[in-house]
Image (spheres, rainbow, N blue to C red):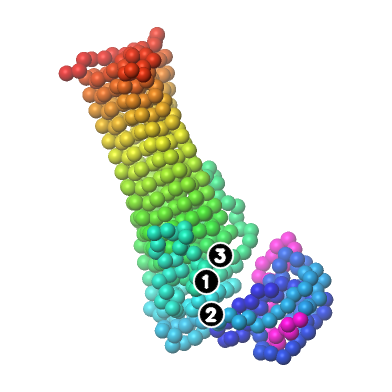
Amino acid sequence: LQCCVSATRRTHIMLCTVTAEPLPLGDGPFLDLTFARCAPKMWEGDRICCVGQILPATQVRSLGETKRKNVFSTSPREIETVAQKPIKTRRTGVCTCSLPETPVPGVFLNAKERRFSSIANALRAAAEGDTILLSSGVHICIEPLVMDKRNVTITHSDDAETACPSSSHPVRDCNPSHSVAIITASSSCAVHLKASGCVLRGVAVKLDGHGGQQNECQHAPAARSPSHMCIAVDGDDSLIEHCNVEGGHGAGIVIRGHRSAIRSCTIHGCSQTAVSCFSESSPEIAASSFMLNLGRGIALHDGCGGTIRDNFIFQSGGSGIECLDRSRPTIRDNHILDGLATGVWLRGSSTPTVVGNRLLRNALAGVRVSDESDPRVEANRVCDGRQSGVVIEGRARGSFVRNSMYGQRQCGVRVGGASQPFLIGNSLTGNEAGGALLEQSCHAVWVQNQVQRNQVVGVGVRGAATLSLTRDVVEGNGGSGLCLRGAAALSAELCVVRDNVGAGVRCWDESVANLARCRVDGAGGRARQSIGLFCGARSRGRRRPRG
């Protein structure tokens, strides 16, 4: 048996037992039975005791159905408190009921000048610009809370900074276990910010219930707007601040309104995307934590812009941040780590700016650029991933400037498809399967990059890929500095290739290397082959002297 208390000091009882006879009644205050949920053990045709009568389950108003047709709710009835003595039941054993001693969670309007029995009643009575104050406790909502009046605010009455205080350790401190107002809902949506200018501040929102849609998959087609969500934002200029959002069987927050903002929130436990943006909205998502979500962390669709900055995205089941459908946000100074998929995935002709992020220990690529996307990726650190640090594929383009890729299980950079990226000033260091691999029919232009101390080859080029190098340094790698296979083509000018364990430049099959004014040396003392330029039977290498 679970109980909560309303503002009218009458108890709402959620009765979870099935009785064979009327419950014994005793003396005490009157109670209001407004919500009875008879658990999975209630079958169609079973009976529930209400106002001293035995009612068939078919006479109880149902708010939902399962395979067993559970009983979910009755219309409000006044009954007396149940005596504190064991109740014999047909299936569920022994149960007792008593009036709880917890304080009443109040709902107030405008500095506590009016009190309401529920948040929904307060929203109906509110005018534009009003503030609804929630005291600490659990506020259960059967239907979505619709904020359909402009500039209405729902906040914590104690002026506590938050249900999720800003902290240097969000995993430990962003937790609604302390005294806050908690809104729970079993419907498809808990809170709907429908009008413009609405504010939700300092509360915890939880989407309760079971079932829902299946968890998202990294390789599944991009889902449109989810059917179950904690918070829906359709109004422009809305604000969600210092909130703790638990998605349960649905998504966290869905944004369709323009210029909306999410600040200093924690979004966790979502089986779908934590935050989804649609309809060319331009949200600001800042200083928030995304933890332990089974779906993606943040997904932007339909040409969305906006700013995603200073967020902490931890152990997402899908991509940490995903841009689709020509989206064009600025992604800046985020920490994305320990994800089960890609850190940042840019696809669907998106054109974002990705600057100053830290992508650590993600299971797939740190940054993945697909389709015809054309991003600017600058000053990011991608390290200790289980696959390649940066993957560029499809017909993608883009500029990759001053990034650092190190400690990857595979390559620092992998380029494929018919992509045409431009890399300048990047560092590829200490990767297990080589600094970079170019394959298929890609064409890459490199300027002033450093490829150093990788465990195998420095740069591998194969298939029909072409690579143009200018003033790049390839040194100290565990294999050849540059290795060409298939019909690959290399053009290098003013480059330094030295101190690699294998040959400086090695050409196989029908590959072609054209070196102009480059310093190409064999290895030093640890050399197996002290060869600057090695060409196989059908390959061609041309080396013009430096100066």
Q: Does residue 429 lie above or below 501 as drawn?
A: below
Give the residue drawn at x 42%, y 54%. Answer: 312
Quadrant location of the C terminus in the rendered image? top left
- In this picture, residue 35 sits left or right of residue 19: left
Q: Pointers 3 and 2 in contact (CB under 8 A)? A: no
Nearer the observer, disc 3 or disc 2? Answer: 2
Q: Tell me the kind of residue under disc 1.
A: Ile
On whether residue 408 falls in the magenta region, the answer is no
Marked residue nearer the N-terminal end (3 or 2) = 2
User: Which residue corresponds to the image point at 38% horizontal and 29% vertical from the top-left?
Assistant: 454
Q: In the rendering, at what x and y percent does residue 338 appear?
A: 47, 47
Q: Earlier in the sequence, mark 1 or mark 3?
A: 1
- Which residue in the rendered view is the most extreme toward the front? 525
Q: Between residue 490 and residue 334, name the one nearer to us.
A: 334
| Left or right placement of residue 521 versus residue 186 in this view | left
Q: Please give the residue where the numbered disc 3 appears in the rendered image.
A: 207
Instruction: Write down the residue under mark 1.
Output: 182
